Image (tube, grey):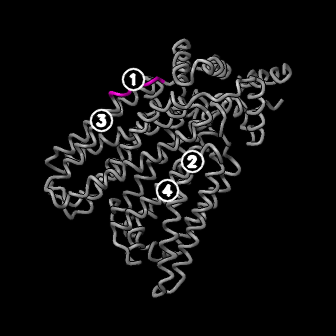
Amino acid sequence: MFGDLRKSLSVHKRAMVPRAYISSSDIEDNADLLKSSLGRDAASPTWKLSLPHVLVATIVPFLFGYHLGVVNEPLETFDLGFHGNTLQEGFVVSTCLAGAFVGCLFSGWIADEVGRRRAFQLCALPMVMGASICATAKSLTGMLLGRFLVGTGLGVGPPVASLYVTEISPAHVRGTYGSFIQIASCFGLMGALLIGIPVRSIFGWWRICFWISTIPASMLAVLMVFCAESPQWLYKQGRSVEAEAVLEKLLGGSQAKAAILELSNTDRGDEANTIKLMELLCGRHSRVVFIGSTLFALQQLSGINAVFCFSSTVFRHAGVFSDLANISVGIANFIGSTIALALMDKLGRKALLLCSFFGMAVSTALQVLATALSASNPTAFHVSVGGMLLFVLMYAVGAGPVPGLLLPEIFPSRIRAKAMAVSMAVHWYSYLIDSLRSFQVLNFLVGLLYLRLLDVMGPGLLYSMFGAFCLLAVVFVKRNVLETKGKSLQEIEIALLPQSPF
């Protein structure tokens, strides 16, 4: 026992010197060593104490889904003078995403400076203001201003929500709680679609749709007053007594002592509290930041946004009404998210990612097969629809929810918030570019070339490219991603400490 403990302390001591990133097998060996050396109580802390705090945090992803879907139905009913102008309609959608990209860049610094709770409250403020401006807009300018403000709140909120849920959750249910984020997004999107149903029959209903979004945003700001602050953030601020009190509130008194001991084992006083952007991109932690950014990039390169854009066309060719098509895609998304919720802490993050990306590759193969069949063959439509639903289902099982949970787990506490901001910025940038292309907001030449390339390549080659990226993601996950199931954040952080070459 003492020999193992000396080895663990030796690993911690060597962490003071920058070193190269180690292999995933060595990482998992080190995590097992830490767990055995600390000799923690085998009993898991209760999940009931932290659940209310997690549920409050999921208001953010609910609003994320709501605001992405709130303009879908009402867009053509806005009485602001731009009906039928696809360029201006595209700006209404994309301005929110542009604001999210800007907000995301600052989210890490905000969360580190003012804490997670106040960051939630700060992100709620522009969402309330922006939605109110949209609801009372008299012109396109007012609508764009409101959408941009909403976007800045959406940019700050989701990274902070992922951080907060990761930092306050017991290790044995952290994956399950992380899956709540994806399910809340599904509920938000479905809620926006349901609330938007009367928009064509009731004049001005679109303004009510925006007013309704101010209710959960206001609830977030108020309820966060009663929620616990992140114990990791409190400890980093030197407020160890408060951190221990919060841990008792979240985990119970019997687990708080062990948790605060683990926090002290990963606290490195020789490192400055501030961290610069170049240190994230080129410093000792650049490897984990690269993994995080690449996961989000592969998530988008898999073709999920294009699949959603093409889904209505695929279903229409199969003779399925658009409303039924949207419901089918939503059900597939919800079922996949529910499966992820059930399996996240049983199979683990890495296994779900591998299964998800591989399943998405299989579904793109079905799409390629459908394009190879005769257009008059009814089997082609059935294969195409089945492949589409399978793609959405498998995306929701792993590629959708796992990156947002996994990255706060593997990022060291010192860089966690800022590294999440950089990684999520890749996510929002991809969303923005896809939106611009979808609505042809890019200049005429780029839009023309994009459509021309699509005509030349054909859907078969396009889906083949998406499948290739999914297979590339399988290889990347297999070689680079650490399994974090059941490990505390401190175990993961010490396990990821680079080894000394001597």
Check the image and report above or below for 328 versus 317. Answer: above
Residue beneath disc 2: 342
Q: Which residues are magenta?
A: 222-229
Q: Which residue is mark 3?
A: 126
Specify the quadrant of the image occupied by residue 285.
Answer: top right
Q: Tell me which numbered mark, 4 or 2, is placed earlier along the sequence.
A: 4
Q: Magenta residues: mostly which secondary structure?
A: helix
Going from N to C along the chain, the mark reached first, 4 or 3, is 3
- Residue with the mark numbered 1: 226
Judge the density around disc 1: few (<14), some (14-19), many (≥20) Cα neighbours within 10 Å.
few
Residue at 37% over, 41% down: 154
Mark 4 burial class by Cα count in 10 Å: few <14, some 14-19, many 20+: some
Q: Is residue 400 above or below residue 309?
A: above
Pinpoint residue 32: horizontal percent, then vertical percent: 76, 33
Which one is earlier in the sequence, the residue at label 3 or at label 1?
3
Gap between marks 4 and 1 measured at Cα: 32 Å
- Tag 2–tag 1 contact (CB < 8 Å): no
Within 10 Å of the Cα at label 3, are there few (<14), some (14-19), or many (20+) other Cα atoms? Answer: many
Residue lying furthest right? 3
Mark toward the viewer: 3 or 1: 1
Mark 2 to mark 1 CA distance (whole Å) = 29 Å
C-beta proximity under 8 Å, tags 4 and 2: no
Instruction: Kindly report which numbered mark, 2 or 3, lies closer to the viewer in this rendering.
Output: 2
Camera-nearest residue between 311 and 177: 177
